[in-house]
Amino acid sequence: MRVITGLEKFLEKEKTKYNGKRIGLIANYASVNSYFQESKNLFYKDSSIHLVKLFSPQHGFRGEKQDNMIVSESYQDGETGLPVYTIYGKKRYIETRLLEDVDALVCDLVDVGTRVYTFIYTMALAMHACRRAHKKIIILDRPNPLNGITLEGNSTEKCFSSFVGMYPIPMRHGMTIGEIAQLFNDEFKINCDLDVITMEHWEREMFFDQTDIPWVYPSPNMPMLDTTIVYPGTVLFEGTNISEGRGTARPFEIIGAPYIDSAKLLENLATYNLKGCKLRPHSFCPTFNKYKDELCHGLQIHVTDRNVFQPLVTAIAIIYEIHKLWPKEFRWKEPPYEYITTKNPFDVINGTDRIRIVIESRGSLDAVIAYFRREEDTFKKVRQHYLIY
C-alpha cells in the first residue's frame, strides 16, 4: 500500500483541530504530497488553514543556495505573497517575536537519515523557539529514506556539538523525522508542546523507493536516493582536501583530488572487505567547489547491495588509504566549518576526534568499527523508547 505522509494525513484528518488558528510553516520545495504539490501551496489554498508566514531551512526555500551560502534573512514569496524567514543565516533560530502572530508552527521537512544533515537541527531549534513562545509545534512525519532499522557510527561527543551534530545520535540514526523530534523533546529535554502527525503504511525496513512517494531532492547536492545511501560516509570528505564530488552530476558518489593515483588507491582498498559496493576508478573536473576546473582522479562508489553496505566504514577506509599513500599532499580542512571556528572540521563532522587520530597514527580500523558497534548498541536502547512504527 502507498505510504501516506504526515502532510497528507494532516490535510485529510487532522487540520480541523486547527481551524481558525494562525499557522507558520517550515518547509521547502521538496515538501510535497504524492502529486508533487508543495505543502506551502496546499496550506495557502486551503480555506480552513490560515497560513501567515513561512520559514526556510539551509539552501533556501527554493533550494537555490549551495552549502554555506547565506540566504536573505527575509523576503516575500512570489506565489503566495507571504513573508519568508530564513533560519539558516546569521541566525539559525526563530526569534520569539516572529511567533507572536502564530498560534502553531508546522514543520514539514525531508530528512535524509544522516546526523549531519542540518534540517533536523533547524527543527530542534524551532522546537526550542516554540517552547519559549508557548506555541505548539506540529511535525509532519516522513520516511527515513535509508530505512528505519540500520544504525552506523558513533554518537556526537558533547565537546564536538555543532549544527551538524547538536545531540548525541549516530551518523546513520535509523529514525523518521517525527521520531527524532520525540527523541529531542524528551531525551534531551526541549520540553515543547509537540504533536507528531504520523504516517500510514510505512514499515521500518523500507528504503525510500519502496514507499511510492515521489523523490524530490531536498537540497542541491542530494539529487537522488543513491546519493543519500552513500552520504553518511562520503560527507566525511568535506573535512578534507579531497573533493566529495560537488560540482559534478554525482556528488558524494565520486571522490578525488589531482594528486590521487586511482589505480594505486584501488589496489590498496582491494585488501579491505568493504561490503555491498564496487569501487571503480574515476576522473572528473568539478565545475565549482574544491578543485574547480581541475582534473581530479579518484573513484566512484557503486552500491551493489544497500542492505549490507556500510557507507561510514567505506569512507573511512578510503580516507585512511589516501592519507597513507599521499601524506604530503593530503590535508584536513581548516576551520571554520558550519560556524565552528576552533575545531578540526573532520572532527566536527564525526562528532569525535578518535577517527582522525586513528588515521593519523595508522592505527587499527577494526578498533574504530568496534567503537561504532558499542555506540550503536547504546543508542539502540535509547532510540527504542521513541519509535512510532
Image (tube, rainbow, N blue to C red):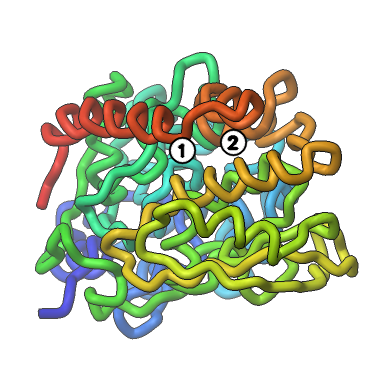
Amino acid beneath label 1: Tyr
Vertical placement of residue 102 versus 130, above or below: below
Quadrant showing the N terminus = bottom left
Foreground pick, 135 / 166: 166
Label number found at residue 160: none
What residue appears at the point 35 percent right and 79 percent down from the top-left corner? Answer: 214
Query: Vertical placement of 365 versus 75: above or below?
Result: above
Which residue is label 2 attached to? 92
In this picture, residue 189 sits left or right of residue 250: left
Is tag 1's residue or tag 2's residue first in the polypeptide sequence?
Answer: 2
Instruction: Classify mark 2: residues with Cα within 10 Å, few (<14), some (14-19) or many (20+).
Output: some
Q: Which residue is mark 1?
A: 121
292 or 2, which is in the foreground? 292
Residue contact at pointers 1 and 2, CB within 8 angstroms: yes
Q: Is residue 372 left or right of residue 186?
A: right
Tag 2: residue type? Arg
Residue 213, relative to residue 274: is it above or below? below
Say which of marks 1 and 2 sits in front: 1
